[in-house]
């Protein structure tokens, strides 16, 4: 106890110096939390928008489809898939899609596109694109001809505007090249430029008719995109669906888009990486301060050993002094970090100044900070370990002193 | 019975380079209850002899026995423990622990001896009362005068119930009144409690009060005078 008291009082012998170290550690912890919050918020926004806009939580396909995306790999019995999804309580909504790759051509040029044939109401229930991303016109209205809903970026590349006509060409189920005229009835901007440049929505009934060369295939689909009530249940529900639909390929969003899984798994590491880099820099500052504290007290340390304080206690005293600095700094940094993360987590940080660059990576313009609870514990433990490590060299220097020489020090 | 006994103690600094012979075969016996001053000109080896007797330094040759223990054979860590239990130190520059109060400074040595908090407090208070500092117990060293700090140092030196007290130039930084006061206290402790004191000093006022004066010249005992 007395050694704790001495350690505590010793750090206040030089309040400015101790204050600077405490502030440096606290700011380091705060910076690590803020960076973690930013990175986590950014990654989560990417994952969230990918799920909400296109991937959904679960997708169901005929097994061959995900390998080469040929039009012939339709779901064998759409009605059964729909019935299963209708009766699964965890499912919030689903959208049946016919998906082909093709080419959109206008007078100004041609672009390769992924064409998604959807039922407008179903799609609006699983994706934010039909309503949230709409910038002009409307999403696939009922009309006599073929309606298309196109990314603004694609429209710009093809020189198209709302109500412009263009030709869509693709391979039908009989491997014949087929073309049809479509009219741009709506434009969207999802904030993800690569997606907007390569994706086109049409009515599923229109696409099915063109694919099969007649109206008889109106009910077919290549994909069922499923939105769950709780994203955490994705693996469990996918397992249930696999059991009920054994001949179909049921994939969670992590399997469909491995980049999302990578991002999710990196969320756990990112705070540790930031923390490690910041603490590594702090170690040298702490060593420097404690070394000064030891070298200034050579005579006093010599006296302590002269009157019978053994080297173990001297070592412990220096370690405790360093720990005391960390114990003051870490909570301050954690509180500061928590307040920052809470504030920016609620109100967001506006990155619209960089929106073009962010959009090209599929990132949102407003980032909401988020820090997993574990990160706070990791930061606290990290500061503790850093303080102990940084104290070892100064403490070792202290116990190497010979009392008789130390007492002669000026 | 001798509390301190040295036989042919030599100390050579820088033995490999330019050797300096600080002590050249000092043999000395100090009995329990003595009030001894070790005197001599600067460089005569007073502090070196005190450091060796106090287990802070090791002799190059010779034998040192303190309280019947050959301390020249102890390791560094054993020496620390030995000093804690057997020797009280009073330094020229007081050397109190600046972050502790007078009471805590005195109690600190007893803490190292694992004495109970109750015993530490009671003894610290009685020792500080004995040196006339009952009203300064909760002051830190920076709030005390030089003489008061040195009296705390004497109380601290006594706290561990040592075999004897070594005081290296204890009055060098004190004014006349403080010196007289400190000497009175040490003399009284010697007379009433039979505490053994060994000083190194230049100070004639200390020499005048000593019951035995050992004079060192060039690392050897030149004179050993016992006074009535």
Image (spheres, coloured by chain):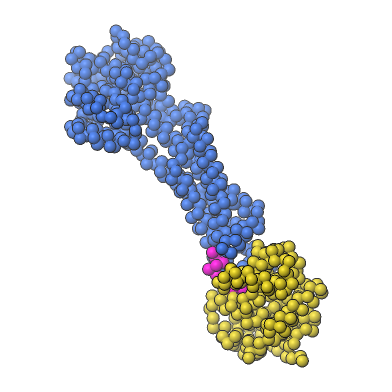
A87 vs A147: above or below: below
Residue A390 lies, in percent from the top left, at: 53, 57
Q: Residue at x 59, y 76 (%)?
A: B84
Q: Give the image quarter of residue A246.
A: top left
Of residues A231 and B200, the one nearer the viewer is: A231
User: A341 left or right of A129?
Assistant: right
Query: On screen, B68 above or below A126?
Result: below
Q: Going 52% across and 56% down the picture, which residue do you hit?
A: A387
Give the camera-side residue of A350 and B206. B206
Image quadrant occupied by the N terminus of chain A: bottom right
Residue B160: % across, % down: 61, 76
Dominant SS of magenta comes to helix
Magenta region, residue range: A305-316
Residue A315 figure quarter: bottom right
Look at the image and tell me whether residue A305 can be seen.
no
Locate residue B28 relative to residue A281 in the image: left or right.
right
The residue furthest right is B176
Above or below — where is A195 with respect to B94? above
User: Residue A316: horizontal and vertical position, in percent?
Assistant: 54, 64
Image point (36%, 18%), residue name: A150
Can residue B146 be seen by looking at this rendering? yes
State which quadrant residue A234 falls in: top left
Instruction: State how many labels appear.
Output: 0
Question: Within the magenta stretch, is there residue A308?
Answer: yes
**Colour of the chain lettered A:** blue
Residue A399 on the magenta span: no
Asked if residue A408 is positioned above or below residue A177 in the image, the reply reads: below
- Closest to the observer: A112 or B160? B160
Chain coloured yellow here: B
The residue depicted at 33 percent of the width and 30 percent of the height is A229
């Amino acid at each position: 106890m007395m050694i704790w008291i001495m350690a505590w009082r010793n750090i206040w012998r030089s309040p400015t110096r101790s204050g600077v170290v405490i502030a440096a550690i606290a700011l380091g912890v705060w910076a690590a939390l803020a960076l973690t919050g930013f990175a986590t918020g950014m990654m989560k926004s990417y994952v969230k928008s990918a799920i909400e806009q296109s991937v959904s939580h679960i997708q169901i396909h005929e097994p061959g489809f995900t390998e080469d995306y040929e039009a012939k790999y339709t779901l064998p019995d759409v009605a059964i898939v729909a019935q299963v999804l209708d009766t699964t309580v965890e499912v919030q909504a689903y959208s049946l899609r016919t998906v082909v790759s093709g080419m959109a051509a206008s007078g100004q040029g041609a672009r390769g596109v992924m064409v998604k044939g959807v039922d407008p109401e179903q799609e609006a229930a699983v994706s934010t694109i039909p309503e949230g991303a709409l910038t002009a016109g409307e999403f696939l209205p009922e009309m006599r001809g073929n309606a298309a809903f196109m990314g603004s970026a694609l429209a710009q590349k093809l020189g198209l505007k709302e109500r412009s006509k263009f030709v869509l060409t693709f391979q039908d189920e009989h491997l014949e090249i087929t073309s049809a005229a479509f009219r741009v009835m709506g434009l969207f901007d999802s904030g993800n430029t690569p997606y907007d440049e390569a994706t086109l929505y049409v009515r599923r009934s229109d696409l099915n008719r063109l694919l099969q060369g007649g109206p008889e295939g109106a009910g077919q689909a290549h994909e069922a995109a499923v939105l769950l009530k709780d994203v955490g249940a994705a693996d469990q529900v996918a397992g249930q669906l696999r059991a009920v639909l054994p001949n179909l390929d049921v994939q969670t969003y992590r399997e469909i888009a491995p980049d999302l899984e990578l991002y999710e798994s990196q969320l756990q590491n990112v705070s540790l990486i930031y923390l490690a880099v910041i603490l590594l820099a702090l170690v040298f500052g702490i060593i420097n301060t404690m070394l000064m504290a030891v070298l200034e007290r050579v005579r006093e340390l010599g006296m302590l050993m002269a009157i019978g304080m053994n080297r173990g206690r001297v070592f412990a005293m220096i370690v405790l002094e360093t720990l005391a600095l960390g114990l003051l700094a870490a909570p301050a940094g954690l509180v500061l970090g928590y307040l920052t993360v809470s504030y920016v987590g609620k109100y967001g940080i506006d990155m619209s100044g960089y929106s073009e660059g962010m959009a090209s990576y599929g990132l949102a313009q407003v980032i909401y900070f988020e820090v997993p609870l574990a990160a706070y514990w990791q930061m606290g433990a990290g500061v503790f370990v850093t303080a102990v490590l940084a104290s070892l060299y100064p403490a070792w220097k202290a116990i190497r002193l010979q009392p008789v020489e130390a007492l002669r020090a000026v | 019975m001798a509390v301190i006994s040295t036989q042919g103690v030599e100390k050579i600094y820088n033995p490999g380079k330019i050797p300096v012979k600080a002590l050249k075969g000092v043999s000395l016996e100090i009995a329990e209850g003595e009030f001894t001053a070790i005197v001599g000109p600067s460089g005569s080896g007073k502090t070196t002899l005190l450091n060796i007797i106090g287990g802070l330094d090791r002799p190059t040759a010779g034998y040192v026995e303190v309280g019947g223990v050959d301390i020249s054979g102890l390791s560094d860590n054993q020496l620390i423990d030995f000093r804690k239990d057997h020797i009280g130190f009073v330094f020229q520059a007081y050397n109190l622990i600046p972050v502790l109060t007078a009471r805590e400074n005195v109690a600190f040595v007893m803490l190292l001896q694992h004495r109970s908090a109750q015993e530490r407090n009671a003894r610290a208070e009685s020792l500080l009362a004995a040196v006339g500092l009952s009203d300064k117990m909760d002051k830190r060293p920076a709030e005390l005068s030089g003489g008061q700090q040195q009296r705390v140092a004497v109380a601290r030196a006594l706290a561990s119930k040592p075999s004897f007290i070594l005081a290296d130039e204890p009055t060098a930084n004190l004014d006349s009144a403080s010196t007289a006061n400190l000497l009175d206290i040490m003399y009284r402790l010697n007379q009433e409690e039979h505490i053994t004191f060994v000083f190194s000093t230049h100070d004639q006022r200390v020499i005048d009060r000593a019951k035995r004066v050992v004079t060192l010249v060039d690392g050897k005992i030149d004179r050993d005078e016992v006074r009535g």
